[in-house]
């Protein structure tokens, strides 16, 4: 059975990410973002959302574990920040229903959602420039980087929240990530 660890970046939906995975039959647990990387045994990691890029704990160490990583909202921003991408304030803050255009229908994480999907997203902060090696894989009218992928390193991120009921194909995002982890 695939084991996915959800790293808690102190976001309000972390428990929903855990529950979504558990309900899919995944062996999963939540750990704090200060847990030493050497203590983690997992086939993949989900970096949760959270309030601040200043509170991403040991994200840099987690990216070196050699397992697939899915960053959600702040989790994606943390990946970009650690790997020298650019994160900044979004032009459109708060939570909203957003239509996302998928740019790469071959992408392992979001390609199956092409050509577009409806999501529940937060854009108080966002990735402004993806790190080297990443491709921008989805965009919207309110955010230039709605998703990013580096399949060579199995690092992925979405600005939106696949764990909430308002996201039309959220479970499919998790299913696609699980396929990468197997």
Image (spheres, grey):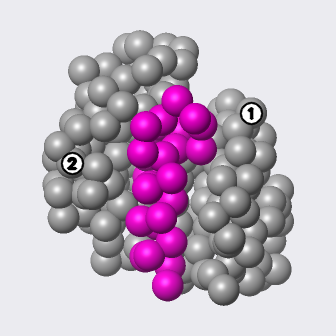
Tell me, yes or no, whether the highlighted magenta stretch contains residue 163: yes
Asked if residue 6 can be seen in this view, the reply is: no
Q: Which mark is residue 164?
A: none
Is 10 magenta? The answer is no
Residue at 70 percent of width and 60 percent of height:
23
Q: Which residues are magenta?
A: 157-182
Q: Residues within 10 Å of mark 2 (few under 14, many from 20)?
A: some
Residue 33 lies in what quarter of the image? bottom right
User: Would residue 101 be visible to someone looking at this image?
Assistant: yes
Q: Image point 44% across, 55% down: which residue? A: 173
Towards the viewer: 109 or 118: 118
Measured along the vertical axis of the image, is residue 132 above or below residue 73? below
Q: Is residue 14 left or right of residue 179?
A: right
Of residues 18 and 90, the one drawn nearer to the viewer in this rendering: 18
Q: Is residue 88 left or right of residue 15?
A: left
Element assignment for label 2: loop
Toward the viewer: 83 or 30?
30
Q: Residue at x 80, y 71 (%)?
A: 36
> Whole-percent x and y of residue 113?
28, 50
Q: Which residue is painted at 68% across and 78% down in the image?
A: 3
Q: What whole-number distance in Å separates the C-alpha atoms at marks 1 and 2?
A: 28 Å
**Dot 1 or dot 2, earlier in sequence:** 1
Q: Which residue is mark 2?
A: 114
Q: Is residue 135 left or right of residue 98?
A: left
Residue 12: image tag: 1
Badge 1: few (under 14), some or many (20 or more) residues near its Cα, within 10 Å? Answer: few
**x and y, in percent, of residue 149 in the image:** 33, 59
> In terms of secondary structure, where does tag 1 sit?
loop
């Amino acid at each position: 059975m695939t084991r996915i660890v959800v790293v808690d970046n102190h976001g309000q939906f972390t428990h929903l990410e855990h529950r979504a995975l558990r309900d899919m039959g995944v062996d999963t647990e939540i750990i704090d973002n200060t847990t030493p990387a050497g203590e983690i045994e997992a086939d993949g990691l989900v970096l949760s959302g959270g309030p601040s890029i200043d509170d991403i704990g040991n994200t840099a160490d987690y990216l070196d574990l050699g397992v697939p990583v899915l960053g959600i909202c702040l989790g994606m921003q943390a990946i970009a920040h650690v790997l020298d991408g650019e994160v900044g304030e979004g032009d459109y803050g708060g939570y909203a229903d957003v239509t996302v255009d998928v740019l790469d229908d071959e992408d392992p994480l979001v390609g199956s959602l092409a050509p577009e999907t409806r999501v529940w997203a937060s854009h108080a902060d966002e990735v402004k420039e993806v790190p080297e090696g990443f491709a921008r894989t989805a965009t919207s009218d309110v955010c230039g980087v709605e998703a990013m992928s580096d399949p060579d390193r199995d690092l992925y991120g979405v600005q939106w929240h696949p764990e909430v009921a308002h996201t039309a194909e959220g479970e499919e995002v998790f299913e696609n990530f699980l396929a990468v982890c197997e």
